[in-house]
Image (cartoon, rainbow, N blue to C red):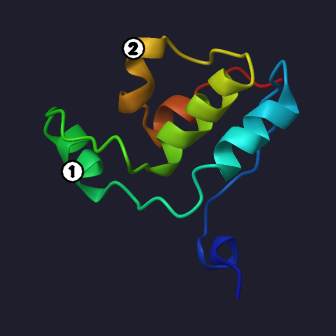
């Protein structure tokens, strides 16, 4: 069973980037890195606990877009992006 099928609310959106192939290659280069559970917990209490060798989903997306030549957020904010921030991006 696919994970998305088990959740009652989800959506798929297109995020246009200048160089889609570079963004996809950057994201693929991170396969195998762990989920950043401490970073997520730190976000909840406004502490910087991010691990540079781990990701959570809403960090990886804007980072990969930046590698593809498109800044979705300020570069200094990339390690503090929540799913809600991605949801609020303008629809294309």
Residue that appears at 61% across and 69% down = 8
Helix, strand, or loop for circle 2?
Answer: helix
83 over 86 or under it: above or below: below
Residue that appears at 51% across and 49% down = 57
The residue pinned by badge 2 equals 76
**Residue 31 in the figure: left or right of residue 83:** right
Residue that appears at 71% across and 52% down = 11
Helix, strand, or loop for circle 1?
Answer: helix
Instruction: Measuring from the top left, give residue 54's x and y in whole percent.
Output: 39, 51
6 over 79 or under it: above or below: below
Q: CA distance from mark 2 to mark 1?
A: 19 Å
In the drawing, what numbered circle is on residue 41? 1
Q: Quadrant of the rendered structure where residue 68 is?
A: top right
Q: Do residues under tags 2 and 1 come within 8 Å of each other at their CB atoms? A: no
Residue that appears at 43% across and 31% down = 81
Q: Nearer the viewer, residue 33 or 3?
A: 33
Q: Nearer the viewer, residue 84 or 36?
A: 36
Q: Quadrant of the rendered structure where residue 7 is?
A: bottom right
Instruction: Measuring from the top left, give residue 27's x and y in whole percent.
Output: 66, 45
Q: Quadrant of the C terminus?
A: top right
55 over 73 or under it: above or below: below
């Amino acid at each position: 069973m696919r994970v998305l099928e088990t959740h009652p609310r989800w959506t798929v959106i297109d995020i246009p980037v200048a160089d889609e192939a570079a963004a996809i290659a950057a994201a693929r280069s991170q396969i195998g890195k762990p989920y950043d559970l401490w970073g997520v917990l730190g976000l909840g209490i406004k502490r910087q606990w991010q691990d540079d060798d781990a990701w959570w989903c809403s960090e990886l997306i804007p980072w990969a877009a930046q590698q593809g030549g498109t800044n979705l957020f300020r570069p200094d904010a990339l390690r503090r992006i929540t799913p809600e921030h991605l949801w609020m991006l303008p629809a294309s």
